[in-house]
Structure formats: structure tokens, C-alpha cells
Amino acid sequence: MTAPDKKNLSPFAQAALALDADFVELERLSGQIDRIAIESDSGLERVQQLLVKFAECGQRVADGVIVFSRALQEAHARAEQAGQIVSARAALVRERQQETDRMLERFHMLSDMVAKITMLLVPFKKPAGTVMSADDRVLIKRQIPEIDGQLGTLIDEALKLRTDAQRSQMRTLERDAASLGHTLMAARSRLNEIMKDPLLN
């Protein structure tokens, strides 16, 4: 495994690595000092040199602990700031999802109403060349104004939903609502053609 490039490390990681290296050095010097015999002049001189290095390393450890503590506080502050940013973003995500759910619920309700209107239009769909009975004409004359009014309401709702979806940048829902609106307007147009039938007047 390749050792990390210290230049790319955060201040916290650099401080931790430096402190760890000094701890390792402190233990190494401690072991050497403990093992060297001091009965000879050379041994005594060597231990004295190591004691100086041990003191220097001990000072680096003390300084390193301060630096590490400061870096730890700064890292903690950054973590809190990141947490606040994510928390605020999560709230926006929840609001967006709730808005999307409300819009989709409107679309599904609208689709259900369209399906019901479509069922009401079934009796008016006669094969070409078929002559409507007197009962059919009475039924159509009675139902067409009501269905036409319902279609007008649904068209208005579909157009409003398309506008709301466009404002919220919900492109798929915007296209679906626009398509549904066109379908409803085509159905209303066919209904108006039926109303112009001389047999109904």
C-alpha cells in the first residue's frame, strides 16, 4: 500500500502523523537509554547524548499535542459546519419530495377523473353509419352539457398542473400534464361535434 503524500493530507492528519512519529521516536529512545550500560565512559557519554535527544523529542511531543489539539478542534468545527450544510440540504430535499408527492397526487386524481369521464363518453361512440335511437338521443342531450362542464374543469386543472410543474421544474410531470390537457381538449372537441349533430336538435 502506497504511503499517503503528506502534502495532500489535511492539517489534522499531518498533525496526527507528526505526533505519532514523535511518540514512536520517544519510545525508541527510551528503549535505547534503558539498554545501554553506563559503567563505561563511552556508554555514559552515549546515554547523555540520548537523554538530550529524548528531551528534545519530549518537547516535540508536547508541542505536537498542542498542535494536534488545535487541529482536532478545527476538524470538529468543520465537521459541525458540514453537518449543518447537509442538514439544511436534507430539509430542502424533504420539501422538494413533499412538493413532488403533492403534484403527483394531483396528477393521479386528475387521471382518475379523466378515466371516469371517458367511461361516460362510451355510449356516444357509435360505429360509422349507425343511426342513433330516440333513447340514445335523449340520453346524449341530457348528459352532454354535464360532461362538457366536467371536461372544462379538468382541462383547467390540467393546464394549471402543467404551469405549476413548469414553475417547479418538474419536466416529466409538465409533459404528462400537457399531454393529458391535449387529450381532454380533443375529447371536448369531439363532444362539441356530437352536439352539432342535426338529429340532436
Image: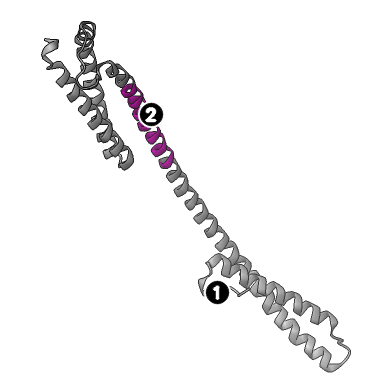
Residue 23 placement: quadrant: bottom right
Please rate how many residues cluster around mark 1, counting C-alpha atoms within 10 Å: few if below 14, some from 14 to 19, many from 20. few
Q: Which residue lies under the disc numbered 1?
A: 6
The residue sitting at 82% across, 89% down in the picture is 44
Residue type at numbered disc 2: Glu
The residue sitting at 43% across, 44% down in the picture is 88
- Quadrant of the image containing the N terminus: bottom right
Q: Which residue lies under the disc numbered 2?
A: 105
Q: Residue 65: x percent and y percent?
A: 63, 66
Left or right, residue 43 beside residue 134: right
Q: Is residue 51 magenta?
A: no
Q: CA distance from mark 1 to mark 2?
A: 54 Å
Provide the residue span drawn in magenta: 93-115
SS at badge 2: helix
SS at badge 1: helix
Q: Are marks 1 and 2 in contact (CB under 8 Å)?
A: no
Residue type at numbered disc 1: Lys
